[in-house]
Amino acid sequence: MTRRRLAWATWDWGWLTVMAAAVAFRLPHWTDRSLWYDESSSWQTAKFPFPEMMQSIRLNVHLPLYYTLLKGWMAIWGESVASLRGFSIAFGVLTVAGMDLFARELYRASSSGDDQEQNARRFARVVAGLVAVSPFQIFASIEARMYSLGTTLAAFSSWLLLRILRERGTSRLWWAYGATAAGLLYTHHYGLFTVAAQYLFLALYLVWLLGAGARAEARAVFAGAAVVGLAVAIVYLPGLALLRIQTGRVRQDYWIPEMTWRIFSGTFSQFLIPTHGFDFLIGGWVVFAVLALACGLVAMGGRRGDGLVLASAIVPMLGSAAISTVQPIWLHRYFLFAHLFFLTAMALAVWKVTRRVVVLRWVLVTLLFAILVGANVAFWKYLDIPHGTGVRGAVEMILAKRRDDEIIVTPDHHQYFPLKYYLGGRATVRLLQPDPDLFWGPHLIRPGDLITTDQLDDALCRGVWLVGRLPTPEITPKLAKARLLERSEFRYYHSLHRRLFVHHYRTRDEAARKERPAP
């Protein structure tokens, strides 16, 4: 009995609480949120045979690691919504664990004393807790996309880097860091900014070591960084070639708008409440001011790990802003990796200004958590999932009413892949042949997915369910003259297709339909 009580007492209840919160805040509407285009494109890409998958990725603007891992995950756990999103949720929770390790190592690098370990644990719980309840991070880890894999690798690579510096660089740790850095580079192109920030920090740290006369330690750090950096660079060469190909596609006709002050403010608004609608622009400037103040406080008298926090938060934004003067690449969700370190900077700033007033520290920490929890309430209220059934709701309605020889058609490839996913072979769905200049989607579209306008007109005699974003579709003259049997409207939680319309058309009456043989 005594041993059981001791084991119970030695559990890290703070860590367990944070991890439980990380899971709990990511589970609402796990499966009842309708998949949207980006998520269904992840499913379709991973579903291709491996050579075809790699060709599809080459024609896209993303990298192969996430899709390769998702393909293996789907082979084990299936293709359900729970499985697809569960993959991202798992990495979202791992991100929280990684930031706990990073924050503990950060505290060790920035302080000393007899109670260092206890205080390091407290600081780590705060940082990990902020990541656990941040709506911006939550949204990244509840969709079937690569972002939570990237945040996991950003967190663990940063933790390993600080641990290397504390333990004077064992080869095992250096190679572990190299593996996580390479993984990040193959997860998302913005991983380049994070790895660049880490090496900028290493360069500045080497300068500091030389200035302090620690030449032996400087040589050891330089040797490890150079060898591992060269190995990562060699491994990344195919990714660099892929980046060059995809950069050409972006320059052709990509959809990211030119950077403006509104977009800049909206990005920081998203950091608090990721509504997609940029509905909180004044709040965005407030968030920017608070984060700028926090970074300034961290920079004042900063110690070893503080430089890594600042570089990892700021370098991606500066790099993106610089490149956007030539080609727009600034997009709020691409700063998910940097956002981890803005949250860390907030915690560091609180610790610095309350060094002698511990009560005030916990008042400010409580306020931060209250703001983020309130932001979660606003976030989920904005999404309004119960009234936004999207394609999932449309498919359920169509399947309940359609006849066996009726087909489903959409003129919008954004709707086609969610339709294809939810129908799962239970009915025929086709995409109306898109414009040859279509940028979004050709890497996923195959000839068997398409239907021509002539084929659509022929199918009208049997019946067509048309799904799209227009309340009154205008596609072919014959469709305009067809009999509209039913019209339904569905809402999405996603602003890309906030309203979805289903029209049921047929051109002949029941007797004429029966006389015509099915194709």
Image (cartoon, rainbow, N blue to C red):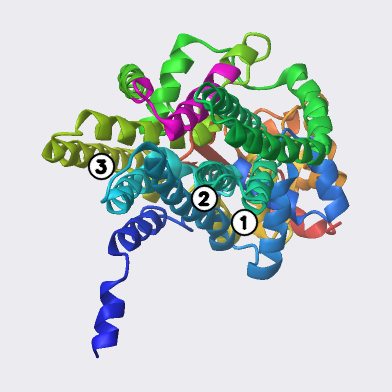
Is 182 on the left-hand or right-hand side of 146?
A: right
Residue at 30 percent of width and 48 percent of height: 116
Q: Is residue 431 magenta?
A: no
Amino acid under label 1?
Tyr
Q: Secondary structure at mark 3?
A: helix
Q: Earlier in the sequence, mark 2 or mark 1?
A: 2
Q: Residues within 10 Å of mark 3 (few under 14, many from 20)?
A: some
Q: Earlier in the sequence, mark 1 or mark 3?
A: 3
The CA distance from mark 2 to mark 1 is 9 Å
Amino acid under label 2?
Ser
Whether residue 465 is visible, yes or no, is: no
In the picture, the disc for residue 422 is 1
Q: Which residue is mark 2?
A: 34
Residue at 51 percent of width and 26 percent of height: 311
Q: Secondary structure at mark 1?
A: helix
Is 216 on the left-hand or right-hand side of 261?
A: right
Q: Nearer the viewer, residue 158 or 410?
A: 158
Is 34 on the left-hand or right-hand side of 349?
A: right
The CA distance from mark 1 to mark 3 is 37 Å
Q: Nearer the viewer, residue 418 or 281?
A: 281
Are the two marked residues, 2 and 1, in contact with CB atoms closer than 8 angstroms? yes
How many marks overall? 3
Q: Secondary structure at mark 2?
A: loop
- Above or below, 121 relative to 220: below
Are the two marked residues, 1 and 3, in contact with CB atoms closer than 8 angstroms? no
The percent coordinates of residue 324 (x first, y second) are 62, 14
Range shown magenta: 298-319
- Above or below, 438 relative to 351: above
The percent coordinates of residue 392 (x first, y second) are 54, 53
